[in-house]
Amino acid sequence: MRLKGIENIDGNLEQYPLTQASTFQKSCRKVSIKIRKKGPILAAKCRRRDQSSKRTALVLEDIENIDGNLQYGS
């Protein structure tokens, strides 16, 4: 599943238009997807501008099963 439009903004995962590629993976580690009551969550430890790290999470909306393939933002 491709996650589009997700950025690390000073240690916070933020969603932008799904037309652009995600770049959070360049500055985040320990990335995982967790299932919670409010839906699937992308969790990570992301680098801040001052080079410290912060745990952050983003609710992933619009995930669908299309013929056995997970699609995000379709």
Image: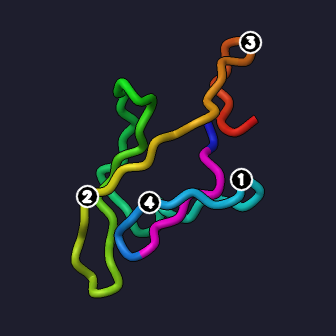
The residue tagged 1 is 18
Q: Which quadrant of the view contains residue 29? A: bottom left
Residue that appears at 39% across and 65% down: 12
Marks 2 and 4, Cα distance to the nearest angstrom?
A: 9 Å
Up-down relation of residue 4 to residue 64 (above or below): below
Q: Secondary structure at mark 2?
A: strand
Residue that appears at 39% across and 76% down: 10
- Residue type at mark 3 is Asp
Residue that appears at 35% across and 27% down: 36
Residue that appears at 43% across and 48% down: 58
The residue tagged 2 is 55
- Span highlighted in magenta in the image: 3-9
- Residue type at mark 4 is Leu
Quarter containing the C terminus? top right
The residue tagged 3 is 67
Where is residue 60 drawn, in percent x and y?
52, 40
* Mark found first going from the N terminus, 4 or 3: 4
